[in-house]
Image (cartoon, helix red, strand yellow):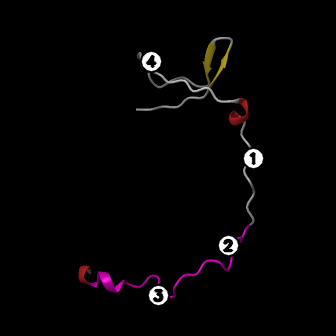
Amino acid sequence: MLTTIKGTYENGQITLAEKPISTQKMNVIVTFLEEEIAKSTPPKTRKAGGLSGKVWMSDDFNESLEDLKDYM
């Protein structure tokens, strides 16, 4: 099982943001993130109705497919 826990590294010490699930001895992998990568950027806002008029659906969309009539 893989588990990801955020933490910080400072002065040779790693401080985890939350307690690990297991207290048994296990192997770990530590990945150091650049400060720029670690900072979250606010999500871009989307305009409501941006795809209006660009999506088309057939009138018989919910009808049975001719190819599947043998299975009904």
User: Judging from the image, what secondary structure is the residue with disc 1 in?
Assistant: loop
The residue tagged 1 is: 42
Q: Position of residue 22 (x, y in %)?
A: 44, 22
Amino acid type assigned to the residue bearing label 3 in the image: Asp
User: Which of the 4 image quadrants contains residue 8?
Assistant: top right
- Of mark 3 and mark 2, the one earlier in the sequence is 2
Residue tagged by mark 4? Answer: 23
**First along the sequence among labels 1 and 2:** 1
First in residue order: circle 3 vs circle 1: 1
SS for dot 2:
loop
Q: Amino acid at mark 2?
A: Leu
Q: Is residue 53 magenta?
A: yes
**Disc ID at residue 67:** none
Residue behind mark 2:
51
Q: Say above or below: 18 vs 25.
A: below
- 13 or 48, nearer to the observer: 13
Q: CA distance from mark 3 to mark 4?
A: 58 Å
Q: Which residue is mark 3?
A: 60
Mark closer to the observer (3, 4): 3
Q: CA distance from mark 4 to mark 2?
A: 50 Å
Segment colored magenta = 48-69
Q: Residues within 10 Å of mark 3 (few under 14, many from 20)?
A: few
Query: Mark 1–mark 4 contact, CB under 8 Å?
Result: no
Task: Classify residue 5 by image quadrant.
Answer: top right
> Height in image: 17 above or below 54?
above
Left or right: residue 25 versus residue 10 is: left
Contact flag, marks 1 and 2 (Cβ < 8 Å): no
Q: Is residue 71 above or below residue 30?
A: below
CB under 8 Å between callouts 4 and 2? no
CB under 8 Å between discs 3 and 4: no
